[in-house]
Amino acid sequence: MTTPGEVERTLRAELRGEVDFGAAARALVTMDASNYRRVPLGVVSPRDADDVAAALRVCAEAGVPVVPRGGGTSIAGQATGAGVVLDLTRHMNALVSLDPAARTAVVQPGLVLDRLRDAARPHGLTFGPDPSTHSRCTLGGMIGNNACGAHSVAWGTTADNVTELAVTTYAGAAHRIAAGWDGAPAGLRELVGAHLGLLRTGMPPAFSRRISGYGGLDALLPERGVRLAQAFCGSEGTLGVVTEAVVRLVEVPPAPALAVLGYADESAAADAAAGLLPHRPLTVEGMAEDLLGGAAGGADGKSRTVGLPRGRAWLFVEMPDEGGARAVARAADALDALVVTDPARQRALWRIREDAAGTATRTPDGRMAWPGWEDCAVPPARLGAYLREFRALLAAHGLRGTPYGHFGEGCVHVRIDFDLASAAGVARFRTFSEELADLVVAHGGSLSGEHGDGQARAELLPKMYGPDVIRLFGAYKDVWDPAGGMNPGTLVRPARLDENLRFEVLPATPFAREVARCVGVAKCRTTGAGGAGVMCPSYRATGEEQHSTRGRARLLHEMLAGEIVTGGWRSPEVAEALDLCLGCKGCLSDCPVGVDMASYKSEFLHHHWAGRIRPLAHYALGGLPGWLRLIHRLRAAGAVNAAARLLPFPVPGLARERDLPHLAKRPFTRGTGAPEPEAAGAGAGPGSGADTEPGADTGSGCGPAVTLWPDTFTEYLDPEVGHAALLVLRAAGLRVTVPRTGGRICCGLTYLSTGRIDRARRVLRRTLDTLGEVPGPVTVLEPSCAAALRTDLPALLPDDPRAARLAAAVRTVAETLEEYAPAWRPPRLDRPLVGQTHCHQHAVLGDAADRRLRERAGLVGEPAGGCCGLAGNFGFEPGHHQVSVACAEEQLLPSLRAAPPGALVQADGFSCRTQIAQLGGVRARHLVELLAEGLQGPADREASGAAPDTRS
């Protein structure tokens, strides 16, 4: 018997691509975006079709199964398996050619759909099928699942848009298939000829979303042109490996228009959808108010969501032009209708629909909802009746889910709050699945409408097709794959739907439940600039799965399972993957299920280094507030700054590529001692000549009282920001109190980011004791500190009511001004603006109030998205400099280079300002600094030093 080691060695000898049978590589591909988990033998990343053939030949000789894998976004489990996983995304990801005249493209299987669409767009073309994972799914995966998407109403499924395929089978034989019998495997023509009657009359009635099983097998009928390539689509990696495809492109209407139709309820919208198809829409999407949570609905049936017409359910009907959209609006029997032609407004409305889909992963009470029955489809005319019975079936089983989807084709997406961790819950999952399959079949539908059957539904295919067709499916697979080595257990002779569940290997702990929330949809693998907000900057820099949020979650999952990753909390594989996590928290907001990898990393480091001496960076950077407080107590800031400039060697524990930020001569709460000029409405300012006293009211306004939080960065590194904030807040008429506590209040962030959770709790308790009760809003200038106080503080001290009260009081400057000085008018700056939005502001705080404040101040433009790459301690730690720079190069540095003349550079985070200064050579300023300068004339700024240099 061939051993895994022998298979690995043979593969290494035969292939030019990577072969990895290590624990980390295997752990990363145990799961896809489904509920299932299977442990592979190893991972191979072939460089080309020859490598694919060699890998398949070696595996066939050894009797090792093979699973082809693209983006790993499959929802039914078909991208997981034992044996060798072929990762087709690393090397075989090229757009080989694009012919605008012929409207075709030649693609490799690992090409991400959006890359094809980007290349086709300048020619007015696109690839018609557009699943919601378009930013990371691959063409090979789409062919495997026969993917569809919103626009298949007009442009069909993937099978409808594939004209030719290059396929390599398990033993390494190459086939080129299109229409006709050329390239077919031996015996296929004879098999079809012997079953013509069954293919003509024994298959369920055809409709556009009959995707389940080998549902396209009747494309091999002679009257349908013997379309071999079309029949191969949807085979889910069970017949062979696609190494190249010729696909058809379609013309994009130059000015599509959107009709949004409001209905009394979901059933009314579903009943209406089929009647709109004669208008030849591009798409007909449906959703009901429960998908929008509290954003819509009400007893009067009026939408509270800006932009949606009146109703409790809606159809989004895209038409090629405005005339078509208005015709639909007139013809539809809707409560209310809206026709939108402006592209920006259309994008905003589509975003409502897309964002609402993310809420389907949670129930109203916050419980997770899981895939498994994500995409059943029925003929569109049956959709209303089906949905009514589907809702009743959910209720009968005590389950909850929120349907939405492609109503124009009868395809419904839903995630359901199955309990897949207990025996009773799994039993209910099986019973519900069997009854739902009966319901779908009773309505003439397909168990899968676009995602494939995989392990989730293949066991139930006999309910849909009957025994004769199921036997024909088995014979069809055996012709292509006589040894049965291609993705066994999928579609034909399948595994049970309630085995290999990924939850069964996890311990029953809160951390395990958190890790399990990653369902693998892989939005973190998006690489287009700004395409996924902030998440995931390290993956964008390296392109390695282990540096994506999903990859890290998978490694943590396997660490807790203990089967592949066996080191527990001391696991070197997990430590390596988390080392490049910037702690940006982008995943907290950008991940559809709210994975918080920054918190997971903190928990891991807490256990990983328990009872051991930590890396020097954890002490040097993790203990930064304490070090800065000590330096200023010793009045050694000048000496430290001089040493940082003159020492010929780097500070231990810090990156040698980085210059240390300069320390301020005097902390913010000890004042500047400089005289301040009179500023209109400003009152006494930061240069009033008096130090800020503990709890002192520093403003002369008669408005509400606010507390200005003296965070570590403002206190010791950038006091100018604090002084500018005093000026702005007092100009708005607010009475400002600044606690002078000798640096004893701290948000604890640096301790959290290095996994010193116990120390963070002690620091936060000390902070609450020192601060006492805060009567009003607490304005926090540093976004990372504000985010830590708002979310981490109550999470770490859940039993201390003071923590919740302080968290609720936290405001950014813009939020403070908007809530407590709504009538104040900021100075008009009327300048273009570039810069960086802090990751934690994006993920935790939001920047809507900041946007409105900038607009009122006449600042034109937006700070860059993405991550600056410094991310607190990350960019200062040894070994991180290259990734830190790569993150900055993704959006921030290009935006600085492209800045218009006279542009102001804004960055509210100290890390962001440091990165901009060190890599961009520009001084960025906090928004309050820009506003403070606007409050003073040029002469005043020169006289007072409105942004005084208080650093040594």
Image: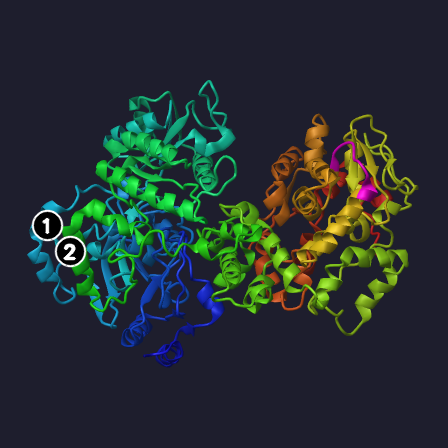
- The label on residue 945 is none
Residue furthest front as drawn: 424
Q: Is 27 part of what is drawn in magenta?
A: no
Taking 689 as reference, is 506 above or below it?
Answer: below
Instruction: Tell me which amino acid carries mark 1.
Output: Leu
Taking 840 as reference, is 108 above or below it?
Answer: below
Question: Magenta span covers which residues?
Answer: 769-778
Check disc 1: other Cα within 10 Å, few if <14, some if 14-19, many if 20+: some
- The label on residue 472 is 2
Residue at position x 42%, y 43% in the image: 418
Give 315 or 530, whichever is nearer the viewer: 315
Classify residue 629 as left or right of residue 496: right
Please provide percent x and percent y for residue 260: 38, 29
Q: Secondary structure at mark 2?
A: helix
Q: Secondary structure at mark 1?
A: helix
Label 2 near label 1: C-beta < 8 Å? Answer: yes
